[in-house]
Image (cartoon, coloured by chain):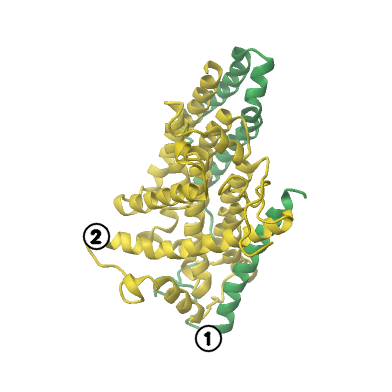
Amino acid sequence: MNPYVPVAFAILIAIVFSLVFVGLSYYFGPRRPTKTKTAVYECGMPPVGTTRQRFSVKFYMVAVLFLLFDLEAVFLYPWATQYSTLLDSFPGTFVLGEMAVFLGVLFIGWFYCLKRGAFQWD
Amino acid sequence: MNGAPPVAASGLLFNSAPLHALVLGLVVVSLCMGVAAWSIWYERKFAARMQNRPGPTEVGPWGLLQPIADGLKMLQKEDIVPAAVDRPLFELAPLLVVVASLGTLAVIPWGDGLVIADLHIGVLFALALSSLMLLPVWMAGWASNNKYALLGGMRAIAQGVSYEIPLLLAATVPIVLAGSFRLGDIVEAQAGLRWFALWPPGPGAVAFVLFFMASLAEANRIPFDIPEAESELVAGVTVEYTGMKFGMFYLAEYLHTLIASAIAATLFLGGWDMGPLGAGVHWMVLKTLVLFAVIFWIRWSWLRLRADQLMALSWRWLVPLGLVLVMASATWVVLA
């Protein structure tokens, strides 16, 4: 059996469970919408302006930083899985040295971001 | 397939593998939903005792039936859909948030062979699905068309992706030490109480703390709960949700915390294996619940971090620490 079939089972069970819960509340819950009830909630005050505004640029900064550092995991994980196998056929200093160079470059990048104030939230 | 199925030599509950997966899936998913529901009772009781209050007492003995009462109440509540929301996304988000958190359960090994799907990339799958939780949270934040919800969603994304990096780096340490991506292999590599949280004396312990902290942040638990900081954002992304849909977000938060504890117990605390005390599902359950209780303890003992402190902690300290840990554990493997 394909090992992903059970994953599909688990996700199906999860979908059924959540549909049943929400479905039951559709069945049992009342439905009497009024104008005030369906208004935007702003702590009881009339809503001010619109929600669809521009965000602060710092959120984009975090997203870009995440992409940069998350890509490193793509390279790190295969290396981590194969690490002991690599050690059988190559000298330890080589396998470790290669990763040290990779992480070293990444570390310099991190230091550059730090110095340029990329981690400055306020 | 007799009354009480003995665990066969293959580790399967039944002779057929799909049936094993299906039954195990149903059992694990329902049990985890139950534990998540009752952990809400437990947390309320725990918090009450810490603050010298009695906590829930009315429904059932020691208030034990409180989760059932809460669930029944939520079922009867009106499902208000505000006029301004983006309807499809708004309806879909509470379903997806529970599905994403329950999907992670597929790869968690509860005992030797007692796993729904024994994937070779178990760690990757667990981390990927548990960070997928961010997507429905953001969907809810955006679709609600409410300023509090939007701010909560943006904070959740920013915090989630920031703590994803230390989480991934900390999870690399057990992978390097065990040399495998399979969660079962990682547990077996820790056999005989050589837990990764203890054994390589330096990197393992720090990686465990780092992983635990990052998991707390991913699950939006105090001290990392700015996405739903109730004193600033009312209820964060759930502000426009009522009744069972709100309940789904609530349940998903507890499920996510429970599953994060289970993953931490598997990666760092030896999973189902307890050395000379034997091995079994009960050890895995015990370790998970202890970590789960520690999360409650932290929640009711600490204050919330400010948004800028939260970001600074991750990017300035935890990310470089994670990089150092990966190098340290790799060096340890070469030397050992």
* Residue B10 position in % (x across, y down): 68, 46
SS at circle 2: loop
Q: Identify the residue at horizontal 47%, vertical 36% (top origin).
A: B275
Q: Chain of mark 1?
A: A
Q: Which residue is mark 2?
A: B51
Q: Identify the residue at horizontal 52%, vertical 18% (top origin).
A: B336
Q: Identify the residue at horizontal 61%, vertical 76% (top origin).
A: A23
User: What is the three-letter code of the residue carrying label 2?
Assistant: Gln
Relative to B303, say whether B29 is above or below: below
Q: Which residue is mark 1?
A: A30
- State which chain is coloured yellow: B
User: What is the three-letter code of the residue carrying label 1?
Assistant: Pro
Residue nearest the observer in this picture, B116 or B258: B116
Real-space Cα distance between discs 1 and 2? 37 Å
Residue B86 is at least partly visible in this image: no
- Is residue B129 left or right of A116 when viewed as pictured? right
